[in-house]
Image: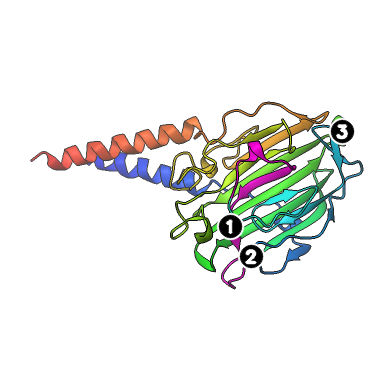
Amino acid sequence: MKFKKLALVAAFAVLASSAMAAAVHDAALFTGNTLARNDDSSTGLVNMGFAAPANFFGTTYSNLYVNNNGNVTFTTPLSTYTPFGLTTNAFPIIAPFFADVDTRPLASGVTQYAASTLGGHNVFGVNWLNVGYYSNQTDKLNSFQLILTERADTGAGNFDIEFNYDQIQWETGSASGGVNGFGGTPAAAGYTDGGANDFEFAGSRTTLAFLDSNPTGLIHGSRNSNTLGQYIFNVRNGIIAPPDGNNVPEPATLALTGLALAGMAALRRRKNVK
């Protein structure tokens, strides 16, 4: 009985940890504008609402394009649906989840965005909440968010990039070789200035790597945050400090997983003893 209780408690702890991986926040601030239900569309140029242009690796921007396929760009809209390597891209992009998002079905959420204020700072945010994948699929839904925060308090042009993930159930649209949302060329995440400065999350374009069901999933890691599923990149004087620790489960998550496995193994052994 003691072993059984241990296994049940450990398994419950793992489930609870996963359920609490909710990084998306203040989503209501970013619902002022909606990109109509679509596949592969983009907005026109949208002002970020910053007091001073954002300095992104030496080039400053006041406006951007919101693209349905999980990213924003600064110099051109992007309708591409199969993710490419961000480290070889020739134009600036910030991509929390670059993949073939399809919001045409009514069962899918829509892409929403707005400029606002949060914590005394100007912010621009994009919500991709409960969005489906190509073609017209909603059996699996993803929820993620991008927030750009002006940090004029640390210097003109400084800002933070924040990726937030609540749920990642699919990784690929069928036009990118996916079957039922998996395989083919999966999602990529990261950023580039279109030149020599870039970063791509470990697991980008790797089958199953970003999914909630995988220990390397986006909801299980963090950067510059104690919140699982939240990755913050501080842009100061146009430069981002080298990222580390991405897509790695927090030690607590690993410990709980190990405890659950140990408990379940003990329970199986207990049952096998007559």
Label 3 to label 2: alpha-carbon separation: 39 Å
Amino acid on which disc 3 is placed: Asp
Which quadrant of the figure contains the N terminus?
Answer: top left
Q: Which mark is residue 153?
A: 3
Q: Position of residue 114 (x, y in %)?
A: 79, 56
Tell me the crowding category of disc 2: few under 14, some 14 to 19, or many 20 or more residues within 10 angstroms, Cα based: many
Q: Which mark is residue 43?
A: none
Q: Position of residue 36 (x, y in %)?
A: 71, 69
Residue 252 relative to residue 268: left or right: right
Q: Which one is in front, 12 or 166?
A: 166
Q: Earlier in the sequence, mark 2 or mark 1?
A: 2
Q: Nearer the viewer, mark 3 or mark 1?
A: 1
Tell me the crowding category of disc 1: few under 14, some 14 to 19, or many 20 or more residues within 10 angstroms, Cα based: many
Residue contact at pointers 2 and 1, CB within 8 angstroms: yes
Amino acid on which disc 2 is placed: Asp
Verify whether residue 84 appears in magenta. Answer: yes
Which element is circle 1 on? loop
Q: Which residues are magenta?
A: 83-109
Amino acid on which disc 1 is placed: Asp
Q: Which one is in front, 158 or 88?
A: 88
Q: Which residue is mark 1?
A: 100
Residue contact at pointers 3 and 2, CB within 8 angstroms: no
Q: Position of residue 231 (x, y in %)?
A: 64, 38
Q: Which residue is mark 2?
A: 39
Q: Position of residue 227 (x, y in %)?
A: 60, 39
Label 2 to label 1: alpha-carbon separation: 8 Å
